[in-house]
Every structure is written in C-alpha cells, then in structure tokens.
Image (cartoon, rainbow, N blue to C red):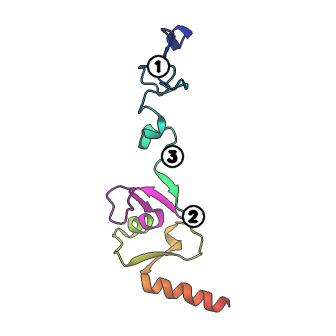
Amino acid sequence: MTLEQITIAGNKRLCACGCGELRSAVDRRGRPRRFIWGHDNKFKLGHENPAWIGGRHNDSKGYPMIKCVGHPKADAQGYVYEHVLVMENYYQCCMLKWGVVHHINEIRTDNRPENLQGMMRYQHSSLHHKAKVVAH
C-alpha cells in the first residue's frame, strides 16, 4: 500500500479493518480513529476476529472447552467441555443430563479416552467425598 492510498484527501484514511472504505481521521471530539464505527475487531465474531483460536478456551476452573453450538450440553455461548465431547465420540453415544465425566488421574486437561470414566452425578460426588475423607 502506497502513502497516497493511506492518506487520501487530508482528513480521510482507510479503515484499519481492511475493508477498503474511507473513514475520517478523527471523531467528533477530535480523538484519532482507526476504524469506521462497527469495524473494530472486537465486534467480529468467530474466525473473522484475529484473536480467534479455533473455538477453544479454558473455563475458570481450567477445563478446556470447545465451541459446539447446538450441542445439548452447550452453555449460553455454545461451548461444551472437551472431556464430554471426547467421551461421546469415543463411545458413540450422548451424555444424559445426570451423567458426568470423571478424570481418573485428576488432571483436568488430560482428556484421553482411557483417562475418562462416565458415571452418574451422585457417584461422582461420593467418589470425591470419599477421597477427601481418606485424606484427612
């Protein structure tokens, strides 16, 4: 891109999102602008956003989650726990709402099928409760 293309008509510049449209260099308060209103990257969703990492992130407890919109166990943003997806794919079934996946070695990011064990919620709770009682 040449300097003439970047600075076209004094007060006009190309939008930084790459759309090729002209924008004013400053907003109505005199602050510098890089984008046309709505063209900022924070408004782009999914693969259009440069921060996109393939629909993966970790939740607050460190469990990996994958974007899978429409899945029965998806949260409000469409993410499902990776260990649930691995378990469902390995056994070719769907997890029932009272079913949970237990990590045998207690490592939250180790989602190998041989490390995962499906069980009912009450079994999982009692398993962890017994482990706490034995530790004390």
**Residue closer to the observer: 52 or 42:** 42
Q: Quadrant of residue 88?
A: bottom left
**Residue closer to the observer: 30 or 119:** 30
Is residue 81 inside the magenta stretch?
Answer: yes
**Residue closer to the observer: 70 or 44:** 44
Screen quadrant of the C terminus: bottom right
Q: Amino acid at mark 2?
A: Gly
Q: Find numbered disc 3 in the image and state the secondary structure of the residue it sits on.
A: loop
Q: Residues within 10 Å of mark 2 (few under 14, many from 20)?
A: few
Is the residue 46 above or below the residue 120 in the image?
above
Q: Circle 1 is placed at which residue position?
A: 24
Q: Amino acid at mark 3?
A: Ile
Q: Residues within 10 Å of mark 3 (few under 14, many from 20)?
A: few
Q: Which stretch did the figure color magenta?
A: 61-85
Is the residue 100 above or below the residue 136 in the image?
above
Q: Residues within 10 Å of mark 1 (few under 14, many from 20)?
A: some
Q: Find numbered disc 2 in the image and state the secondary structure of the residue it sits on.
A: loop
Is residue 56 inside the magenta stretch?
Answer: no
Distance, label 3 to label 2, CA atoms, is: 17 Å
Q: Please name the residue shown 47% across and 19% down the image.
A: 24
Mark before the other along the chain sequence, 2 or 1 = 1
Q: Nearer the viewer, mark 2 or mark 1?
A: 1
Q: Circle 2 is placed at which residue position?
A: 62
Residue 37 image offset from top left, x and y in percent: 42, 30
Distance, label 2 to label 1, CA atoms, is: 43 Å
Q: Circle 3 is placed at which residue position?
A: 53
Q: Amino acid at mark 1?
A: Ser
Distance, label 1 to label 3, CA atoms, is: 32 Å
Mark before the other along the chain sequence, 3 or 2 = 3
